[in-house]
Image (cartoon, grey):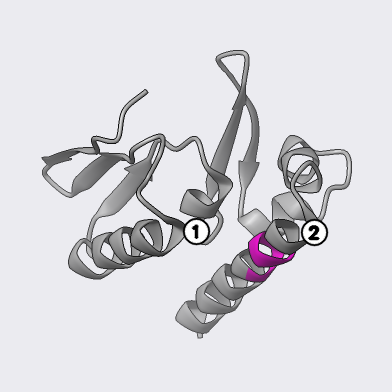
Amino acid sequence: MTKKQRVCVKENILIYFPPIFPPSLRTDALIQSAIRREFSSCTVLTIAHRLHTVMDSDRILVMRAGRAAEFGAPGELLGDPGGLLSELVRATDAETRAQLVEMAAAAADKEEGAQH
């Protein structure tokens, strides 16, 4: 298990591998915020193990057994009660679940605001 994070930038694509065990949720949120701010003109691919790390992304690709299981906006995926992302979120405690749903809603609001 690693606490190291890896970043690769090529042309306008940033590939980010966050640490499996970040120092704290707050630190992880600060890192994510900095990446979104500093690389706002880039496509950011985040390979993550934690739902908090990706829940406010524009799109999420959920993998199962090495294959794409579902792809879409977080709120869209959470809207499918039989979906894998919904299943993963339901498996968390009530407080975490509420945070994740709130993050997905904020991402949808941000996306909608950017389109207008």
At horizontal 47% and vertical 51% (from top left) the residue drawn is 53
Q: Is residue 65 left or right of residue 14?
A: right
Secondary structure beneath dot 1 equals: loop
- Segment tinted magenta in the rendering: 98-102
Residue 50 seen anywhere in this rendered image of the structure: yes
Q: In this view, does 7 lie above or below 27?
A: above
- Which label sits on residue 58? 1
Label 2 Cα neighbours within 10 Å, binned few <14 / some 14-19 / many ≥20: few
Q: Is residue 9 left or right of residue 85?
A: left
- Which label sits on residue 94? 2
Q: In this view, does 111 lie above or below 78?
A: below
Q: Is residue 14 left or right of residue 29?
A: left
Q: Which amino acid does label 2 sit on?
A: Ala
Q: Which amino acid does label 1 sit on?
A: Asp
Where residue 33 sits, quadrant-wise, is bottom left
Quarter containing the N terminus: top left
Q: Is residue 5 left or right of residue 32?
A: left
At horizontal 83% and vertical 48% (from top left) the residue drawn is 80
Kindly indicate whether the residue at mark 2 contacts the one at mark 1 (C-beta within 8 angstroms).
Answer: no
| Magenta stretch: includes residue 101 | yes
